[in-house]
Image: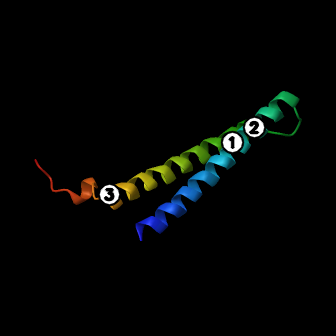
Amino acid sequence: MYKTLQKKMVGIAEKYADLIDAQIVEAALAKEANKPGIEIGGTLHEITDGIRILHHAIAALERLNRIDAGTSNAAQPNKN
C-alpha cells in the first residue's frame, strides 16, 4: 500500500519541481526582456506557492518512508 502511494508522491514532487523550475526560467526571461504586461511579482508569488506545495509533498513522502520503515514517531511509545 505504502509503496504505491510513495511512487505517486515522488511523481507529484517531480512534477512540481519541474513546474517551479519552468516558472523561475520564465520569470528570469521576462525580467531580462522587460516585457510589458508581465507582472514579475505575481510570478514570484506563484513560484513561492509552488515551493510551498513541493515542501508539503516532500514532507508527506518522508512521513510515508518512515511509516513504511517502521520508524514512525507516532508508532513508537512515548518514553517520557
Marked residue nearer the N-terminal end (1 or 3): 1
- Name the disc covering residue 4, or none: none
Disc 1 marks a residue whose amino acid type is Asp
Q: Residue furthest left?
A: 80
x then y, percent, for residue 25: 75, 37
Out of 50 and 38, give the one closest to the viewer: 50
Q: For the residues marked 1 and 2, what is the alpha-carbon distance in whole angstroms? A: 6 Å
Q: For the residues marked 2 and 3, what is the alpha-carbon distance in whole angstroms? A: 37 Å
Can you tell which of label 1 and label 3 is closer to the viewer?
3
The residue pinned by badge 3 equals: 69
Disc 3 marks a residue whose amino acid type is Ala
From this view, report whether residue 8 is shown above or below residue 56.
below
Point 60% across, 52% down: residue: 14
Determine whether label 1 and label 2 are within 8 Å by CB.
yes
Say whether residue 44 is left or right of residue 65. right
Point 28% across, 59% down: residue: 70
x then y, percent, for residue 38: 83, 39
Can you tell which of label 2 and label 3 is closer to the viewer?
3
Q: Residue furthest bottom?
A: 1
* Few, some or many residues within 10 Å of mark 1 (<14, 14–19, 20+): some
x then y, percent, for residue 52: 54, 46
Render colour scheme: rainbow
Marked residue nearer the N-terminal end (2 or 3): 2
The residue pinned by badge 2 equals: 25
Q: Secondary structure at mark 1?
A: helix
Q: For the residues marked 1 and 3, what is the alpha-carbon distance in whole angstroms? A: 31 Å
Out of 59 and 6, give the one closest to the viewer: 6
From this view, report whether residue 41 is shown above or below residue 61.
above
- Name the disc covering residue 21, or none: 1
Point 55% across, 49% down: residue: 54
x then y, percent, for residue 20: 66, 44
Q: Quadrant of residue 12?
A: bottom right
